[in-house]
Amino acid sequence: MKSNTSICIGFLVYPNFTQLDLTGPFEVFSRIPDAKVHLIWKKTEPVRSDKGMSLLATVDYAHCPDLDLICIPGGPGQVELMQDHETLAFIRDKAQRANWVTSVCTGSLLLGAAGLLQGYRATCHWNSMDMLAILGAKPVAERVVMDRNRITGAGVTSGIDFGLYVVAMLFGEDLAQQIQLQMEYDPAPPFDAGSTKTASIHIMDEVQHQMSSLQQRRRAMTQLAATQLDEVDVEL
Amino acid sequence: MKSNTSICIGFLVYPNFTQLDLTGPFEVFSRIPDAKVHLIWKKTEPVRSDKGMSLLATVDYAHCPDLDLICIPGGPGQVELMQDHETLAFIRDKAQRANWVTSVCTGSLLLGAAGLLQGYRATCHWNSMDMLAILGAKPVAERVVMDRNRITGAGVTSGIDFGLYVVAMLFGEDLAQQIQLQMEYDPAPPFDAGSTKTASIHIMDEVQHQMSSLQQRRRAMTQLAATQLDEVDVEL
């Protein structure tokens, strides 16, 4: 555990990301007393989420400092980024110098495409979990998965649990619990439908149907990314 | 329940708001198939949260359409807004024409300052709950509180529960459960510290100590707003 709470954190932000993948853990991390939290994109401009919320990137790739922790959120835009070699190189570079390499939701597929999950246990949104294996990772259906310095969160809202887990690990349970109480994180979902273990079959079928064309494209791009992994020469 | 899923929703956004108060329910509402979700401020410019995340407002007061549902998030900046009579008048005007008047966290104090909670049961962040009474509301320590067409959520993360509650009520449990599964909202907080009922005394003391100067200012501004409520002539 660090004796002070100084930490430099960077979230990648990109067109068509899922904003709650990022805004959940951002809310947690930004409450670490001395945290500096960056939102990173190619340009310091507003970046539009898949649902039309635009967040202002605070630093571009060229000016991004070395990070203690890098976090990659997921979302439909992640699919295109798997062939954006500038972004993959940026992630790889920052990850190699970071203490912690992390993601939420399908952000782990971007870590995987950057060659950063080969041989690592990792998680992802439930509907894309099996794609991790295509990239050489070992899929684990848990809400937060840590393997050495890789910490991955499952779908969307798991980013809040992930954030608290990381704060507790780095700065102790007292700070994590303070942040949890500040955020009144005493969740009471009105239904028990948040997991494939508990959701009705017809709810799950409907969601998979809605996502099917995106998932088809995601799988194809994941397979393409996997064929390029041999070309990545990275010290893991 | 509406037979289609068309709905026009507006979130107020303002300097020093708490972003997760808004981004949680935004993620839920923006997944309603035909929802139009606005982020409203005086100007369509980036608006900075209390923790330094800037969101782009999508419509200004003058161009904001009538809303089916208005939602006011909380945050430190809410304190100053309680004396911003342009904003209070805007909230009042839109609320009077909306079907649903809602808030998350200390956003309910803004509804109260606008004269919209007199005689209504409502909730707020746990540490400001009692201030609701100063504005004529009846404080209820629950995560989501509905009284006629006012729906208020408790602190920060309760906005996700609030969002799912609203979707279920307006569009049925099937859609709410689909959204819950899409968002993998199967929360697993690493600690049981998210409520004053379960947090340790020393955690609660520490959080209250951290918030004490803000709370002092919040209380003074709430009392000032209460003295001005008689001047508000609004059909509730």
Image: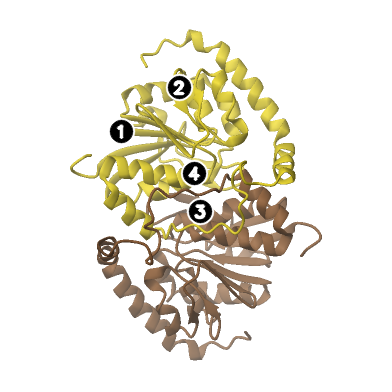
Chain colours: A yellow, B brown
The answer to whether residue B207 is left or right of residue A52 is left
Question: Do the residues indicated by labels 4 and 2 lie within the same chain of the protein?
Answer: yes
The numbered disc on residue A68 is 1
The answer to whether residue A66 is left or right of residue B134 is left
Report which residue position mark 3 lands on. Answer: B45
Q: Chain of mark 4?
A: A
A52 lies above or below B25: above
* Quadrant where the image shows the N terminus of chain A: top left
Distance (Cα) linking label 4 and label 1: 21 Å
Nearest to viewer (mark 1 / mark 3): 1
The answer to whether residue A30 is left or right of residue A73 is left
Q: Residue at x 49, y 51 (%)?
A: B55
Q: Chain of mark 3?
A: B
Going from N to C along the chain, the mark reached first, 4 or 2, is 2
Amino acid on which the number 3 mark rests in the picture: Glu
Amino acid on which the number 1 mark rests in the picture: Asp
Q: Residue at x 76, y 65 (%)?
A: B1
Distance (Cα) linking label 1 and label 2: 18 Å
Amino acid on which the number 4 mark rests in the picture: Ser
The numbered disc on residue A117 is 2
Nearest to viewer (mark 2 / mark 3): 2
A231 lies above or below A164: above
Viewer can see residue A209 = yes
The numbered disc on residue A158 is 4
Neighbor class of circle 4 (other Cα within 10 Å; few <14, some 14-19, many 20+) is many
